[in-house]
């Protein structure tokens, strides 16, 4: 076995450190991010005080519900998986220059198609849960593909169409669970009939590792991690990923190099919807819910996953720790009611964190542009004729 020379080790070290070194204005972005995160934390504490809550008690409640014990960790990891799937899909779309904001509806449609398949098919063993997840991904992808078709044939703006399709998805799922297709009326503790589908069969539910009181890791988390790593490698290392990034940077250049702009953009939009639909299927088959389709199945996972992608700046691997942070807020937010703090303040905290992470690059870029627009002081040049200077 040949020994590795010190020169090669030093070269690898320098290349690794070069990748970690921030680009132009990088340290300014990092410093401004730290400052804005501190400001966001202070603003959150102030809001808690103004609403009669205690910042320390609220932080303790979030910690108790998310990270304090094995139950909290289990809930956090269950929340992180669908958030990561939605975020990875949003990263694909953004890399191609398309802004998909209809993930909430795509999650619902994925859950609807997955529930219909899971209740209609009688497949043996774990084959049923695999088919349910595939059907959910196909459903979400097809729903997003409708927006791509509207752009292609009618010129409808993608953010507008995907957003409006979300409201249509909500009405469609509400109707579906109130009909004999999937419906089962269950009397809740409040006495109000909650429309829901029949529960999925036992072999249509996704298993995991670990048992109570230990941490339980659902298979959905591994699925989301594989998706994040796979998308990151494809976008950065493959020819297809290069075309996607080129399309996002300059569609005209991509078209001149032979890229089918409309087809590739529509496919990335459908792929983003497929991952959001897969997240909906995961919410249906994992222990995070009741394994029934309900109108509130998405529970803002689509919106929060989009925020995860924004904070991660459309980088799938960075979305992994960011999704964990958002999962902590979701899991711990359920414990805030014990301190008398309204749950919606968790959404305010998430919004402040998003602004704290998204704003610094924009502010630094604006500062550099304004600084570059200011003309520099021109050094005074002598205009005395040469002959006069020579005679002098």
Image (cartoon, helix red, strand yellow):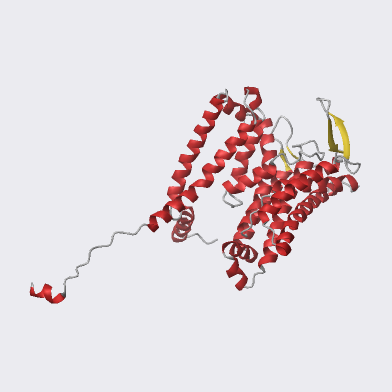
Residue 218 falls left or right of residue 47 = right
**Residue 253, position as x, y percentages in the image:** 58, 69
Q: Is residue 313 left or right of residue 160?
A: left
* Residue 121 on image: x %, y %: 90, 48
Image quadrant occupied by the C terminus: bottom left
Question: What residue do we see at 13% from left, 77% from top?
Answer: 387
Question: Looking at the picture, does residue 22 appear above or below residue 348?
Answer: below
Q: How far across and down, in percent of the image, does residue 386 sit?
A: 15, 75
Write the residue at 56% across / 50% down.
313
Which residue in the rendered view is the most extreme toward the bottom? 387
Residue 389 position, x and y percent, is 12, 72
Residue 28 can be seen in this image: yes
* Left or right: 115 as drawn, with respect to 324: right
Q: Nearer the viewer, residue 82 or 15?
A: 82
| Residue 188: quadrant of the picture | top right
Q: Nearer the viewer, residue 215 or 335?
A: 335
Location of the N terminus by quadrant is bottom right
Q: How many marks?
A: 0
Report the front residue among 164 and 369.
164
Identified at 69% across, 31% down, the residue is 71
- From where the camera sits, is residue 66 visible? no
Residue 137 to residue 391: above or below: above
When asked about the image quadrant of residue 115, the answer is: top right
């Amino acid at each position: 076995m040949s020994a590795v020379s010190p020169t090669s080790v030093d070269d690898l070290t320098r290349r690794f450190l070069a990748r970690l070194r921030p680009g132009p204005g990088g340290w300014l972005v990092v410093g401004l991010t730290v400052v804005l995160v501190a400001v966001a934390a202070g603003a959150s504490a102030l809001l808690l005080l103004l609403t009669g809550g205690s910042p320390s008690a609220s932080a303790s409640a979030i910690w108790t519900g998310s990270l304090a014990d094995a139950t909290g960790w289990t809930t956090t990891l269950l929340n992180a998986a669908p958030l990561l799937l939605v975020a990875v899909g949003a990263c694909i779309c953004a890399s191609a220059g398309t802004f998909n904001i209809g993930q909430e509806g795509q999650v619902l449609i994925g859950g609807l198609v997955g529930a219909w398949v899971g209740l209609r098919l009688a497949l043996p063993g774990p084959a049923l849960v695999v088919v349910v997840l595939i059907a959910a991904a196909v459903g979400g992808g097809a729903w997003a593909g409708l927006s791509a078709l509207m752009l292609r044939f009618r010129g409808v703006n993608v953010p507008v169409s995907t957003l409006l399709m979300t409201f249509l998805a909500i009405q469609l799922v509400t109707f579906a669970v109130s009909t004999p297709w999937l419906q089962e009326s269950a009397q809740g503790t409040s006495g109000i009939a909650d429309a829901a589908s029949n529960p999925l069969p036992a072999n249509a539910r996704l298993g995991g590792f670990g048992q109570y009181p230990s941490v339980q890791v659902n298979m959905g988390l591994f699925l989301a991690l594989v998706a994040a790593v796979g998308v990151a490698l494809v976008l950065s290392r493959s020819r297809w990923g290069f075309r996607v990034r080129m399309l996002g940077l300059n569609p005209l250049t991509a078209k001149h190099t032979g890229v089918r702009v409309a087809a590739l953009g529509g496919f990335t939009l459908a792929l983003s919807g497929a991952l959001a639909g897969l997240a909906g299927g995961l919410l249906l088959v994992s222990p995070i819910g009741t394994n029934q389709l309900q109108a509130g199945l998405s529970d803002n996972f689509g919106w929060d996953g989009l925020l995860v992608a924004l904070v991660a700046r459309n980088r799938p691997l960075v979305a992994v720790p960011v999704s964990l942070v958002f999962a902590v807020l979701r899991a711990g937010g359920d414990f805030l009611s014990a301190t008398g703090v309204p749950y919606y303040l968790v959404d305010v905290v998430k919004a402040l964190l998003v602004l704290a992470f998204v704003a610094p690059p924009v502010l630094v870029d604006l500062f550099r542009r304004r600084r570059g627009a200011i003309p520099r002081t021109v050094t005074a040049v002598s205009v005395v004729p040469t002959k006069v200077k020579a005679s002098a």
